[in-house]
Image (tube, grey):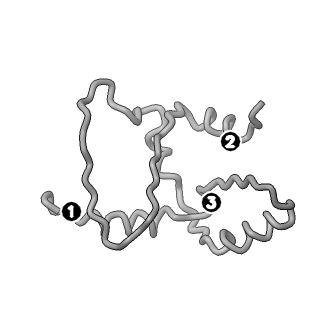
């Protein structure tokens, strides 16, 4: 907010624009039967809207590396607006082109 930006509001706008099933990939692994897993996936994920969003990362492919070459360690302090017992850590993988991304997404691990 010190720069005149309401971060929460901007995140909500981003979510509304880009939270779309057409730019998501879901992988499910479990010891349950395939039928049970399919029912579970349908129950919890079929209502995700398809807003026909364009993946926001497309304009950055091969242009902006996710990590700076030389940077000092930094601390990010976050003040939650509600209680939560979860935390997610995400590390971006730099895929240099859309073709490389498609190759990775459409191939099976060995």
Q: Mark 3 or mark 2, which is nearer the start of the sequence?
A: 3
Residue 72 placement, left or right of 59: left
Residue 6 coordinates in the image, percent (x, y): 23, 66
Residue located beneath label 3 in the image: 22
Q: Which circle, 2 or 3, is nearer the viewer?
A: 2
Give the quadrant of residue 73.
Answer: top left
Give the quadrant of residue 74.
Answer: top left
Who is closer to the viewer here, 60 or 24? 24
**Tag 1: Cα neighbours inside 10 Å, few (<14), some, or many (≥20)?**
few
Q: Which circle, 3 or 1, is nearer the viewer?
A: 1
**Tag 3: Cα neighbours inside 10 Å, few (<14), some, or many (≥20)?**
some
Give the quadrant of residue 64.
Answer: top left
Residue 30 placement, left or right of 22: right
**Tag 2: Cα neighbours inside 10 Å, few (<14), some, or many (≥20)?**
few
Residue located beneath label 2 in the image: 105
Q: Is residue 40 above or below residue 56?
A: below
């Amino acid at each position: 907010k010190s720069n005149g930006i309401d971060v929460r509001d901007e995140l909500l706008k981003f979510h509304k624009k880009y939270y779309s099933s057409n730019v998501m990939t879901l992988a499910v692994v479990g010891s349950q039967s395939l039928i049970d897993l399919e029912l579970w996936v349908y129950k919890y994920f079929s209502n995700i809207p398809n807003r026909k969003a364009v993946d926001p990362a497309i304009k950055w492919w091969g242009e902006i590396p996710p990590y700076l070459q030389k940077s000092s360690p930094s601390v990010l302090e976050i003040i939650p607006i509600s209680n939560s017992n979860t935390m997610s850590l995400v590390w971006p993988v730099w895929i240099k082109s859309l073709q490389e991304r498609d190759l990775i997404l459409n191939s099976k691990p060995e």
